[in-house]
Amino acid sequence: MLALSPATRCSTMPLTIAIAAAFLGAATARGQSCLCGTAADELVAAQVGLDREWVVQVPFDTKGWRLEHVVVGDRLVVAQAGDGTVAAIRADTRPGGPRRGAIAWSQRVGGTGPIEPPGIGSHSVVVARGRGITAYTEDTGRMAWERSLAGMASAGALPVKGWVYAPLDAGGVDRLPEDAWFVTTGEQSKVDIETFKHRLTIDSQGPVDFSPVAFPNGVLWCSSRGLIVAIVTDDDVSKRIEFDLGSPASGPPVVRGGDIYVATRAGDLARIASIPSGLTANSGVLKDSQGQKVPYVGWHTVLNEVPEGSPIVGGDTVVVSLGPWGIAAFDAITGDRRWSVSEGGLPLAITDTRVWCLDDTGFLVSRDLASGGRRDRLCLGSFTLPVINTVSERLVLASPKGLVVSLAPWRSAAATPPAAGAPPAAEQPEPPAEAEEAAPAAEGVEG
């Protein structure tokens, strides 16, 4: 059977919409794309229970380069292009700051070599490129510092709890102080010598292929052989916790509270539940400093198929891709299988009662989180760059030309507290489950 590209399939939209879309040629010429009839169309999104929070064009040279990474954080969405452009989009509102959806700042990363995905911390955004790493202040984007690494970066770096952790391709994780020095006019103007002495390369027990993940009071990463290492700091004392998965992970671990969810290439899905500090784990067995076994709370489920990528966690449900064998969901507390479907797809995000997936035919499909039944099937148009959001209940779409859109479930969008003395707002009715035949009006693009 002949497979059509997303652009070809979308061209079958009603004639009135196609004519209206012609008026958006000027926006398209600037590297932007038509939203009409796609999931990013405000009216189409409303039909499937989503509110379009914002849409923005990332400023970079769209003629010679493509958008490569979009990373979702609690307060920022950071987009990164192949020409070295790093743009921070405000995902929250702050008094006196940029409005939500505005580009808070944009910078160009120097150096040579491949650019790894950006790491978002509470105070800075860091980007590793080749043998160097650059840090920008989270709020203004001012370059705080740039330093060399002990080797070539193998994955994105992450700032957390005053430190920056950068995996190296030869093995090891470089740990640098987050704000020990500042750079102005190309010269080092201040150096905290005592803090600088704490820079070191941590034994990672093998190469690290995924970006580190923030963990309560610390950070964790997973080596290529499947060893999870967590560095936790309590009372200014750092402790190392290890857990051997017994097989390489299929994607980066996902942290919810103190729990870790991870899938492996051996066909396993596991929840590592709130490992106490000072303990180590090997193949699911926890031991204290004296080598004595300690009771471990969690679960481990053997899958009949090999999973792909990271699990997505929303509420009390874990959803994981089984590659060409389909998608499955499990109870986040017990590990019991809730449902599975044979249609393949890549889970992107969970919004309220829906899990959104990029299916094998290039459409955006939502499934009921409780049953797995298909609820919506939408055209992606140019939004073909997958953005996996394991942080918030937001569906973020991106195009290689730099258009980025954030969609929130109605329940979240309407959760803003009313003004003092105002009566509570009436509950909005549930929108229709299917919106494939809806004919949305033409939509402008915000730059």
Image (spheres, grey):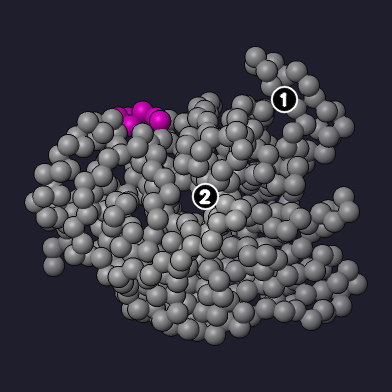
Query: What residue is at 72 percent from the left and 79 percent from the top?
Result: 297
Query: What residue is at 55 percent from the left and 71 percent from the top?
Result: 315
- Camera-near label (2 vs 1) is 2
Which residue is disc 2 drawn over?
A: 72
Residue 286 is left or right of residue 105, and the answer is: right
Residue 324 can be seen, yes or no: no
Residue 232 is left or right of residue 291, and the answer is: left
Can you give x and y, in whole percent of width and height, for residue 428 in the image? 41, 66
Query: What residue is at 42 percent from the left and 69 percent from the top?
Result: 354
Callout 2 amino acid? Val
Q: CA distance from mark 2 to mark 1?
A: 26 Å
Can you give x and y, in whole percent of width and height, for residue 115 in the image? 50, 37
In which quadrant is the N terminus drawn? Answer: bottom left
What are the residue bounds of the magenta stretch?
59-65
Which residue is disc 1 drawn over?
A: 182
The earlier-in-sequence mark between 2 and 1 is 2
| Neighbours of disc 2 within 10 Å: few (<14), some (14-19), many (20+) | many
